Image: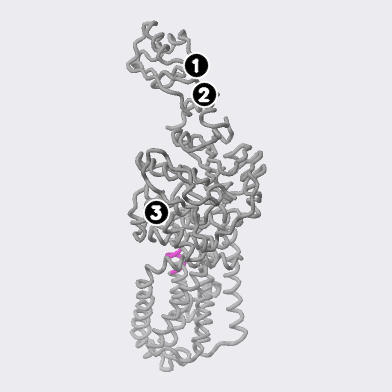
Amino acid sequence: MRPGLAKPAENQTPGIPGLALVAPDIRSEPPDLPGNVSRMPAPDVLIHARGLAKKFGDAVAVAGIDFDLHRGEAFGFLGPNGAGKSSTMRMIGCVSPPSGGELTILGLDPVADGPAIRARLGVVPQEDTLDVELTVRENLLIYGRYFGLPRELISARTARLLEFVQLTDRADDQVEPLSGGMKRRLTIARSLINDPEILLLDEPTTGLDPQARHAVWDRLYRLKQQGVTLVLTTHYMDEAEQLCDRLMVMDRGKIAAEGSPRELIGRYSTPEVLELRFDPAEHQQAAEKLADVTAERMEVLADRILLYTQNGDAALAAVRDLGLEPLTSLVRRSTLEDVFLRLTGRRLED
Amino acid sequence: MTGAFAIREFRFWLTNYRRTWRGSIYSSVLNPVLYLGAMGLGLGTLVNARHAGGLGGVSYLVFLAPGLLAATAMQTAVGESTYPVLGSVKWLKTYQAAAATPLRPADIFHGHLLFTAMRLAMNCVNFVAVMAGFGAVRSAGVLAALPVAVLTGLAFAAPIEAYAVTRTKDQAFALLFRFGMIPLFLFSGTFFPVSQLPGWIRPVAYATPLWHGVALCRSLSLGTATLGGALAHLTYLVLLTAAGIAAAHRTYVRRLYV
């Protein structure tokens, strides 16, 4: 039995403190509707991959990766564009046969049992695949029918899901004129129409403005609270930090590191970072002088110098003692961006 | 299971069609009226005046109508199997949306082809109704010509859908219309018997699917069909459709399972 499914609605974990939005629990199904049969207790490992690889001709997109995804987890693949995240996601979605290695999803083989697996997945693809000529409601109807759901169940779920993604008042509008954020939320609603056991989200907020991103994150956070297993790819470190319990940092088709956001930062970075910006003419000289400051690590970027340290303010004082006067200085906490820089020598977002 | 899955994709197309059916019915009635009026009646006056006995003993209108039925099926098929397929896989990505559900690429293709067959049947029925209005129906044989016209359409639709799903741009379609559909429309026996063409080019006409469709629709409609001839035409059209379906099974998988 999945968490959230058996519990009565009033016992649900409350949403994010401070957020007044009241969202219906999308998992609570009226008992008289079909499709709510309790599933057999399933093994705890939902996705199992060993040496999983994907090649396109000679190009290697995924170079043999290992991971296990557990029920109820929010699991993220973090990496820059071209790291192999989407290829991995498509293999999990059973629309891309692996070129090598082992992959089991819900105990089944994605190549032989694709339809059976996909019936239990929800997919939010990188690019919206909504039918923009149809209405919001029709999109959910069509999608529910693809899963062979009866019409009454689809319309009951549609009402609940549209409320969940705050699109109830647009139910009978055509999709075309909706904003990017609304389309994204509709795609999320659509991906939940079959009450999936795993929700796959490929770059869920890429291309959205900050406000729309936060609206999507809020919805995803609620799903997580309700016990939905989430797998997402992202190249936004803030998205990964906010939503993921566990992360795979991917780079060039390989896994560079694995752990919770906190663990990764603790393992690969220092608590604080001092960011310095100098006059471009003095940038290089300053970098050479700074080698004398006692920092655990220094990264010289094109426009900034980063000093990784236990204490940012003390480091800044040490910089000034050397007679260096940066144009701007900033002491901040380490982020996943720093982890990525440390692991790959490159930046995550460009 | 496969059939049930294909029906789900077919119903998607049906839902989609609900918004556009009025316009499509309008043109599927108007086109035969224009062609049968201008060519069958208008041009027919000249043809009938030259040939007192008409063509094979019938007026030009009666000769033309069943050929045009098959040609209409071809036009419908080409229209339904080019842009809608490319649009589904490239612009709207509704094929990819369906591929993320239990549906397999073959189900998506079957559902779309089924919808194409429905559109063919609708347009052909409309055509026959207009034909009857023009007094161009000579025998109940036209009822046998109807499914043949639909099959003629499928013999175009299946291979073209198999091809269209591999495309990333629509340029090839303009070539297909210009150098494929229009020459076939004009020279496959729709407007005049292929025997009027120079001897050396006739084998080309006989090799095209439209000629088989036109010849069979006409002979059924005029009551001149022979069993051997009908079987030969049917075999050709069925084989071409089957080859298209087999090809589509491969191309749809290749495009949707990257």
In the image, is residue A246 above or below residue B164?
Answer: above
Q: Quadrant of the C terminus of chain A?
A: top left
At a point 54% along the width and 28% down the height, the residue shown is A263
Amino acid, disc 1 = Arg
Nearer the N terminus, badge 3 or badge 1?
3
**Marks 1 and 2, how far apart at CA:** 9 Å
Magenta segment main secondary structure = helix
Name the side, left or right, on which B73 lies relative to A281.
right
- Which circle marks residue A342 in the picture? 2
SS state under label 3: helix
User: Which residue in the protein does label 1 denote?
Assistant: A297
The image position of residue A31, as x and y in percent, is: 52, 60
Tags 2 and 3 both on a single chain: yes
User: Bounds of the magenta span?
Assistant: B175-181
The amino acid at mark 2 is: Arg
Question: Which of the chains bears the disc numbered 1?
Answer: A
Question: Which numbered marker is on residue A163?
Answer: 3
